[in-house]
Image (cartoon, rainbow, N blue to C red):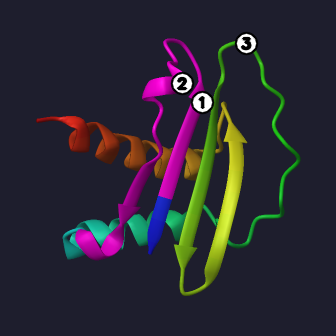
Amino acid sequence: MRLELRTEGGFGFFPGLAAPFVLDTDRLPEEEAQRLAELVRQARVFERETPPPPERRGDARLYRLTVESPAGRRTLVLSDPLEPELRALVDFLRARQRRARRP
């Protein structure tokens, strides 16, 4: 499974530094790959109806999440506040992104 997360907006957002974060489960330890697959399942990424574009409010963040798996490819555009299942998935990806940036 391959996931891509783009984050826009929010306090301290700098478009030039906002490169998308890509994570491939084939490159993760098995336990972490399984946890990520479970988070995608719990967030019901492939079962969700396509929501209308979120309304931008103040400094709310906008998340563009793309998931590619044997089930297909799906892109969701989300904004804060996120449902708990989506929040858990986005937080997992953002934590991995922070770890990847460390020297």
Write down the residue under mark 3. Answer: 58
Write the start and end of the magenta stretch as one range: 4-27
The answer to which of marks 3 and 1 sits earlier in the sequence is: 1
Q: Is residue 15 above or below residue 30?
A: above
Give the secondary structure at mark 1: strand
Residues at marks 3 and 2, CA–CA distance in whole angstroms: 16 Å
- Are the residues at dot 1 and dot 2 in contact (C-beta closer than 8 Å)? yes
Residue 102 location in percent, x, y? 17, 35
Q: Amino acid at mark 2?
A: Pro
Is residue 9 rendered magenta in the image? yes
Q: Amino acid at mark 1?
A: Glu
Residues at marks 3 and 1, CA–CA distance in whole angstroms: 12 Å
- Are the residues at dot 3 and dot 1 in contact (C-beta closer than 8 Å)? no
The answer to which of marks 1 and 2 sits earlier in the sequence is: 1
Write down the residue under mark 2. Answer: 15
Is residue 26 rendered magenta in the image? yes
Write down the residue under mark 1. Answer: 8
Q: Name which quarter of the figure residue 25 lies in.
A: bottom left
Residue 50 location in percent, x, y? 83, 60
